[in-house]
């Protein structure tokens, strides 16, 4: 049951906001600089960023009729030039597109991850962690989680904590798990706060401390974690957020 819950959580974690990546990687927005005719001219000349932004216009229907298929074709042209936002976009937004095979999607994601993009590294790690487009390989997943975590990716830190807690791809180590959970929780990750509560409740890597457990459960509960709310009540915390 725990694995099933984690599966649904990680799917949302990867694919909830794929378009946000381009905000970090595009210091200049071609959509605000060029009109449609100039953007098409640049894209046809082979400019990878112009191809990406032209794809965006077709995808979102900006100054042109929305056309998902045409958008995909321009994203592919951009991605083939190793433009990371396009590679990531194809591997997330177009993950259910019948015109793209799973090996192709995995290849785009791998290329984006290898370029050093943390979001792509995390998404690739999840592919190996859950066997999405690739065979299960916890060791490889941990490697990519670590690469993303080194760049401050808080969910990657969370999953490193999970891997060290249960021994997925690494030797089980509660102290190491606690450290990663703490790093993620300090950045506001509610699931990491929940797992810190679990660590103090069951004495994983620390002495049992129900007050600290309640403290971290409360942090998670305040962000909407319903199971944390339930555990708070079981611990007798009358100050826990009310259930919806």
Image: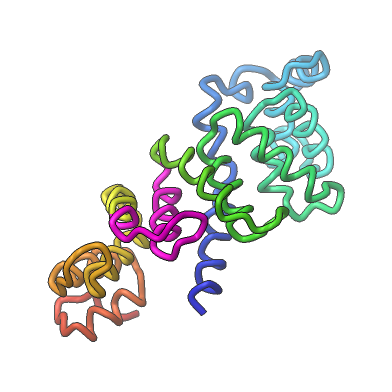
Is 4 on the left or on the right of 52, as rendered? left
In this rendering, is residue 186 above or below 86? Answer: below
Q: Main secondary structure of the magenta part?
A: helix
Q: Residue at x 53, y 45 (%)?
A: 122
Is 51 on the left or on the right of 185, as rendered? right
**Of all residues shown, which one is farthest toward the right?**
99
Residue 104 at x, y percent in the picture: 79, 43
Residue 192 image-quadrant placement: bottom left
Please tell me which residue lies in front, 103 or 233: 103
Q: Residue at x 55, y 74 (%)?
A: 4
Residue stretch rendered in magenta on the structure: 153-178
Please tell me which residue lies in front, 52 or 122: 122
Residue 77 at x, y percent in the picture: 80, 28
Residue 140 at x, y percent in the picture: 58, 47
Residue 112 at x, y percent in the picture: 63, 33
Residue 191 image-quadrant placement: bottom left
Is 8 on the left or on the right of 215, as rendered? right
Q: Residue at x 68, y 28 (%)?
A: 53
In this rendering, is residue 207 above or below 55? Answer: below
In this rendering, is residue 236 above or below 94? Answer: below
Looking at the rendering, in which quadrant would you find the C terminus? bottom left
Residue 31 image-quadrant placement: top right
Instruction: Residue 212: say if magenta.
Output: no
Colour scheme used in the picture?
Answer: rainbow
Please tell me which residue lies in front, 37 or 98: 98
Q: Residue at x 75, y 37 (%)?
A: 58
Please tell me which residue lies in front, 114 or 138: 138
Instruction: Residue 170: say if magenta.
Output: yes
């Amino acid at each position: 049951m725990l694995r099933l819950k984690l599966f649904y959580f990680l799917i949302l974690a990867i694919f909830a906001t794929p378009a946000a990546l381009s905000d970090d990687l595009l210091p200049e927005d071609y959509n605000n600089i060029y009109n449609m005719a100039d953007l098409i001219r640049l894209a046809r000349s082979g400019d990878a960023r112009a191809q990406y932004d032209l794809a965006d216009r077709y995808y979102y229907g900006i100054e042109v009729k929305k056309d998902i298929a045409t958008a995909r074709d321009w994203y592919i042209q951009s991605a083939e030039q190793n433009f990371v936002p396009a590679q990531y976009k194809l591997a997330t937004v177009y993950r259910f597109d019948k015109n793209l095979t799973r090996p192709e999607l995995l290849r785009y994601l791998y290329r984006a991850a290898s370029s050093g993009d943390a979001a792509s590294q995390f998404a690739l790690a999840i592919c190996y962690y859950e066997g999405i487009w690739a065979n299960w390989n916890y060791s490889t997943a941990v490697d990519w989680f670590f690469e993303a975590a080194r760049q401050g990716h808080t969910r990657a830190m969370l999953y490193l904590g999970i891997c060290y807690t249960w021994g997925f791809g690494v030797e089980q180590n509660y102290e190491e798990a606690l450290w990663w959970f703490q790093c993620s929780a300090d950045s506001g990750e509610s699931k990491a706060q929940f797992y810190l509560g679990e660590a103090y409740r069951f004495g994983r890597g620390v002495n049992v401390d129900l007050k600290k457990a309640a403290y971290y459960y409360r942090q998670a509960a305040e962000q909407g974690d319903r199971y944390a709310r339930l555990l708070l009540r079981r611990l007798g915390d009358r100050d826990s957020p009310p259930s919806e």
